[in-house]
Amino acid sequence: MAPLQSLSSSLFAASLAAIFVPGIAAGGLPKWALLSVAALVICFIKTPLDRLTWICLAFLGYLALSLAWSDDPAVGVLHLQKWIILFALFQWGRTKPNLHMAGAVAITVAIASITLLPKYVGGFGNPNFATEFVLGCLPLAVAFTPFMAVPVFLYFCFAETVLHWFALFLSLCAYTLQRKHFVFRGITYRPTNAALCLVLVSFCVAISIALSFESIRASVFARLEFLLPTLALWWEHPIFGHGLGSFNYEFPRVYGLTQTVLDVPFSMPINYYAGAAHNDLAQLGMETGLVGFGFAVWLIARTEKKGPEWCAVLLLLAASLIGFPLQNPASSAVFAVCLGYVQRPCLPFCWLAFASKYAHINIFRYLRSRRI
């Protein structure tokens, strides 16, 4: 099993690195095809078959069922294929593979590609997509060697986006509030209440300074233009949502809601193609309702909130509040594997054990007595 685990970790690192091959669309099917090949090989490794697995399979069944009431089932089928790939990677993450080397390799390739091909942002075409990927791999690479923080910091200083600073500040606040102490490379840190308050104040001050810039303020308002209509669509069908893949079909009819509520002009053309809600949790709720949103919250809540893998989950969750890293192949693959890694152990599901536990209940004897 050890050689297979090593092989799968190397395969995952190679897949993440190959995602940055120039000429392949950032979120297109060719890159998802790379991940599907990796997921197919990973499936041959022994993965847990327990209650959590069955619950996840049931949720995939619910996503497939939601295509019945989706207004765009063709797009929904494509999204379902991506969910299946991410489920395979999630299951592999539960086997506790070595992800630190994969993160270091992926970040090295990503930053090298971005430096050599700045026009195409290393093959991604959008600095936000590349930054989200680097954010997700950052804790894994630093756990491999702390020296990886140097090129990442230099990349953040010259990146054409400020998304990473928002995600870093927000995840730092969440992590410090969640834990009264944490261990890094054998050293235990115990932040005082004053330090926690200082982190929160610094976050608020940083947000205020950022909003003073016109470009950042316009970007924030553009995301509000996506968020409020998405929440309005969710309110129309709160329990089961509009169905998988229905966002881009439903969004145009409520696009002007933000301008109506806030009485402000449009910051983007009226015929602008959103592509995504720029808030993954809101879009998940809009398409799958409280059923899908509740499943996501439950899956995140049952994690072991420690280690670099949990930090990677936190960073990508923070970035998903103002973007859609969980819909792009590279960053969503990192998120799925790390989320599987930090899941709490679950007892295996065994029908024989269930039967032996309740063997004293003889259903046939009960039915025979009722007939008499």
Image (cartoon, rainbow, N blue to C red):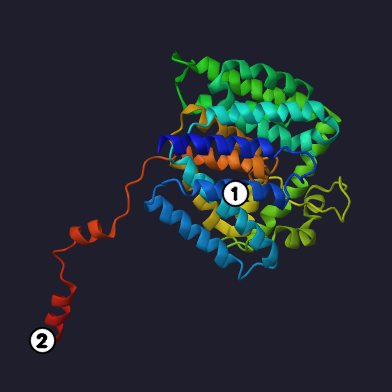
Q: Which residue is mark 2?
A: 372
- Name the residue located 46 percent from the left edge and 32 percent from the top edge: 305
Q: Residue placed at 37% from the left, 41% from the top?
A: 345
**Under tag 2, what secondary structure?**
loop
Total numbered circles: 2
Position in image of residue 9 (x %, y %): 52, 35
Q: Residue at x 49, y 16 (%)?
A: 191
Residue 73 point in image, percent of width and height: 67, 67
Q: Quadrant of residue 136?
A: top right
Disc 2 to disc 1: CB gap under 8 Å: no
Q: Is residue 256 above or below residue 324?
A: below
Query: Can I make out residue 173 in this image?
Result: no
**How far is disc 2 from disc 1 in space, using C-alphas?**
61 Å
The x, y position of residue 184, in whole percent, is 48, 18
Amino acid under disc 1: Val
Please say whether residue 109 is visible from this viewpoint.
Answer: yes
Give the label on residue 37, or none: 1
Quarter of the rendering containing residue 11:
top right
Near mark 2 (Cα within 10 A), the count class, few <14, some 14-19 or many ≥20, is: few
Label 1 residue SS: helix
Estimate how packed mark 1 is, as few (under 14), some (14 to 19) or many (20 or more) residues with alpha carbons within 10 Å: some
Q: Is residue 363 above or below residue 8?
A: below
Query: Percent from the top left, x then y, of residue 251?
Result: 75, 58
